[in-house]
Amino acid sequence: MKKFAAPLLLMMISLLVFVMVSFLLNSRNGIEASADSNNIDHVRFKVTDEQPYRTSYHFQPPQNWMNDPNAPMYYKGVYHFFYQHNPYAATFGDKIIWAHSVSSDLINWIHLNNALEPSEPYDINSCWSGSATILPGEKPVILYTGIDHNKHQVQNLATPKNLSDPFLREWTKHPQNPLITPPNEVEEDEFRDPTTAWHGKDGKWRVIIGAQKGNKGKAILYQSEDFVNWTVSPKPFFATDNTRVIECPDFFPVSINSTNGVDTSVENSSVRHVLKISYQSKQHDYYFLGKYVSDKENFVPDEKFTGTSKDLRFDYGKFYASKSFFDYAKNRRILWGWVNESDTTQDDIEKGWAGLQTIPRKVWLDKSGNRLMQWPIEEVENLRGSKISITGKKLEGGSTLEVSGITASQADVEVLFELPDLESGELLEDPSEVDPQLLCSKPYASRNGQIGPFGLLALASKDLTEQTAVFFQIYKTPNRYLCLMCSDHSRSSLRQDLDKTTYGTFFDIDPNLKEISLRSLIDKSIIESFGDEGRASITSRVYPLLAIKRDAHLYVFNNGSQSVIISKLNAWSLKQAEIGLEGSIRCA
Ligand code: DQQ
């Protein structure tokens, strides 16, 4: 044996050196496209020092895969954010962990050690999504899903080791785990994602857990007096037909007459309730406004789920598995959503990372009571640098105006358009027959209307061969006016092998509306857009080849036959957020 020891050692050392060198090379993670437009299908990437698609102010781990936001909370002056992470690869994996970062402002972040990793029979095959609840006496706890040794999904409790550490660096798994195993009426491998718990009037805690039985999606309610022993409610809190599994449910009250948020346990006549479900096969987050009937322990939505474009969504673009929390420091409810990639898995492996989080959004009930409003948290405005403004500029039909003087690849743009008489909008006899996403996808050349399309061309190349058009078009119907909001990705990149689905939605507008606003947060490969002060939002992932770094441009355009006026446009270059490891903040 001895004579093999030296060569074996040498081999192991060489292997180690090889692995380390490859890791270092890969972890530089740069990609740069050689934009040979004659041969665009074959464009591949080469490693360089800088990545054009890695974001500057969106939350990202240092490397590898990230998906759902987990257990956001505020504790002793610190915001906590946990997330689903594969620390070993830029793809999803079978040992998913809970990574953990902290912040004082929800924009700049310090990455800490992982909070939860597979270690016990009840979570040995992954620690999946869950939520935090702050128990009386300011004691935060986490309920999360473990994939156990049988690949069944069970719910576990973890508590902080040291409550006097505001960073809550270490977490202890409860000795009685698993606390909840799949009940008879659900499938053992489709039972996950406990919500933040709320406290009922009877003093008991309640959580709901996403599940599936046959084709039905379910949210199963559990109750507990001590947060350790949980009893299943005999009937589901909520169920849908033909959706299969409901993932990452979220349930919270919203104030009827204020934009402030309220604690998850508030239940009185000044609030309505929101149930959000993540519909796995569509990868969309749908929400329902409705009535929480606490004595019957169920939720009665105002509208039934149809599985069509009529259902309300938090975001009509790339946005999934979202999670909200009540930020009692600023009395607001904040929503995070996972933004997946639209490039290929091979691209993700070459980039060395995949997945973003949206800029956290404040969420509240619209005055109409019919939908939620969302707006990027005010803290993002602290990143604003140089500014450019345009006022009172008429945009004739068919015109395009460049917004120059800011970093167009990393910007915050707010524009207010003055509208012509809404009566001059095109007639849509029966909007319920029209899928807005399909309407938005009409080929660009044929898409010209009366009032609009008008909006922004973001991440555009100088010659406009690459552009992501985020725009509005106004329609009249027999009894109301509608705004179509779209994000058109058909020309977002010269590359062909990307998911370029165009997204869109309708929303009602006030018949007396004179102006409409559009805000876009642009960050290298993501555009988050908010229409009409946050009435609708669309998040896009785009990977331009030409419109990167200094070659990215921003335009305002109007392609309708009626002119619109830019009443006010403010655009800012945004600075890079500080997102890095503890002790050595590196920029993202
Ligand atoms: N992601 C988690 C699950 C959840 C899904 C696994 C939603 O807990 O259902 O990473 O994206």
Image: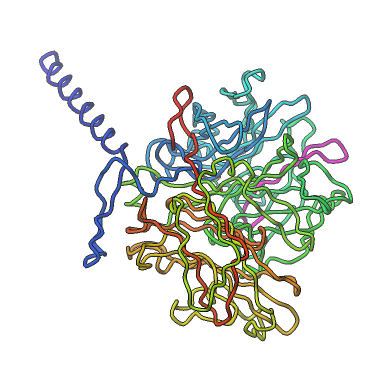
Front residue (pair 108, 316)? 108
Q: What stretch is highlighted in magenta?
A: 198-218
Q: With respect to residue 347, does 422 lie above or below? A: below
Residue 2 drawn at (x, y percent): 13, 13
Magenta region's main secondary structure?
strand
Asked whether residue 458 is in view, the answer is yes
Residue 513 drawn at (x, y percent): 72, 71
Residue 47 placement, left or right of 188 = left
Q: Residue at x 43, y 42 (%)?
A: 65
**The quarter of the displayed image where residue 562 is located:** bottom right
Asked whether residue 215 is in view, the answer is no
Q: Residue furthest front?
A: 392
Please say whether residue 215 is one of the residues in the magenta stretch.
yes
Quadrant that contains the N terminus: top left
Q: Residue at x 10, y 15 (%)?
A: 3
Q: How is the image coloured?
A: rainbow
Quadrant that contains the C terminus: top left
Residue 43 placement, left or right of 168 = left
Front residue (pair 421, 404)? 404
Residue 289 placement, left or right of 410 = right
Q: Residue at x 65, y 85 (%)?
A: 427
Please say whether residue 497 is one of the residues in the magenta stretch.
no
Q: Which residue lies furthest to the top in this view?
A: 2
